[in-house]
Amino acid sequence: MTAPRHFLQFKDFSREEFDYLFERTRWIKQQFKSYHQYWPLVDRSLVMIFEKASTRTRLSFEAGMQQLGGSAIYLNTRDSQLGRGEPVEDAAQVISRMSDIVMIRTFEQEIIERFAGHSRVPVINGLTNEYHPCQILADIYTFIEHRGSIQGKTVAWIGDSNNVCNTWLQAAEVFGFNVHVSTPPGYEVEAERAGLYGNDHFEQFADPMDAARGADLVTTDVWTSMGFEAENEERLRDFADWQVDEEMMKVARPDAVFMHCLPAHRGEEVAAEVIDGPQSVVWDEAENRLHTQKALMEFLLLGRV
Ligand code: CP
Ligand code: NVA
């Protein structure tokens, strides 16, 4: 049996494969918008394992699989043996004998790597502490839809150097754009954790205004990610000067777009005027999770069609 292909971190796919996925996304989205039935995955089932909460990821994978003619099964830690200490390797053996593709949202990246190592079917990372590759797949597709090629552009990441930030940094190497990161002291990017090859595509700035200056895309995320709730109060204090507000958007390029993976906290990492303002593309960004992941599942299950 040949080893299945997985999408566990952004750099698992090549630039050429992403270009193909985006081409398929455009076509699949068009079918959906014009109410054309496209059922290439009839009889295929997706198992979705959630060890953390979700709205968009669950909905986009579940609806996406149904729209492609297949079915989706939801498992969470609380209601399955996963929460009672069944070894990840055993769960992978069993789940992958009963399904065609698996999506996992969990804590350490190591968990999903172990699962994939024992899975007979493709495994997709639906967010780990380290990465959120499906999010950046949708984000780059959204940028291209609004502004064209992202190559050579500048993305400003303001706030926590978390899983979403790490994935932007990996994507910068694949697509050849720059990421300007500004975090409070003590929360800087750890290149090794981000899985970077080098430092060619990113620069850290002490002052968030400097990071945003001249950017084509300004983006941020919650100050406290899932799993880090115990640090919430301390983070509220530490991140207070890292809010993306109208002043910050003014120093970016006039045609800069604002993105946020959501859920957002208005008045914390982003001002309401920005996320609800004319430069914000957050709803397109959320919707594109559906279309890009449908292309991803099609590719992992059927290859090039
Ligand atoms: N952006 C994102 O992954 O949202 P959910 O946590 O709602 O899935
Ligand atoms: N960084 C956030 C993203 C949520 C979609 C978290 O991990 O909670």
Image (cartoon, rainbow, N blue to C red):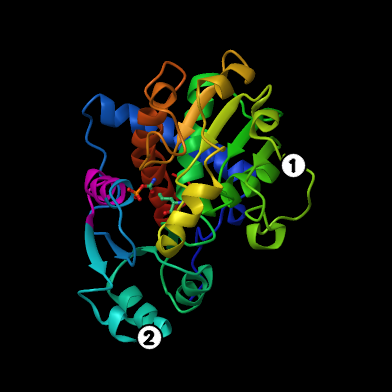
Name the residue nearer the viewer: 191 or 68: 191
Q: Amino acid at mark 1?
A: His
Query: 213 left or right of 147?
Result: right
Q: Amino acid at mark 2?
A: Asp
* Residue drawn at x 47%, y 32% as measured from the top left: 259
Give residue 201's mark. Answer: 1
Task: List the single residue furthest toward the top.
Answer: 254
Is 168 rendered above or below residue 115? above
Which image quarter holds the C terminus? top left
Is 258 rendered above or below residue 179? above
Callout 2: helix, strand or loop?
Answer: helix
Query: For mark 1, does the 10 Å Cα neighbourhood hold few (<14), some (14 to 19), or many (20 or more) residues?
Result: many
Query: 154 left or right of 35?
Result: right
> Quick check: can you spot residue 15?
yes
Q: Is residue 182 magenta?
A: no
Residue denoted by label 2: 90
* Residue drawn at x 39%, y 86% as measured from the top left: 87
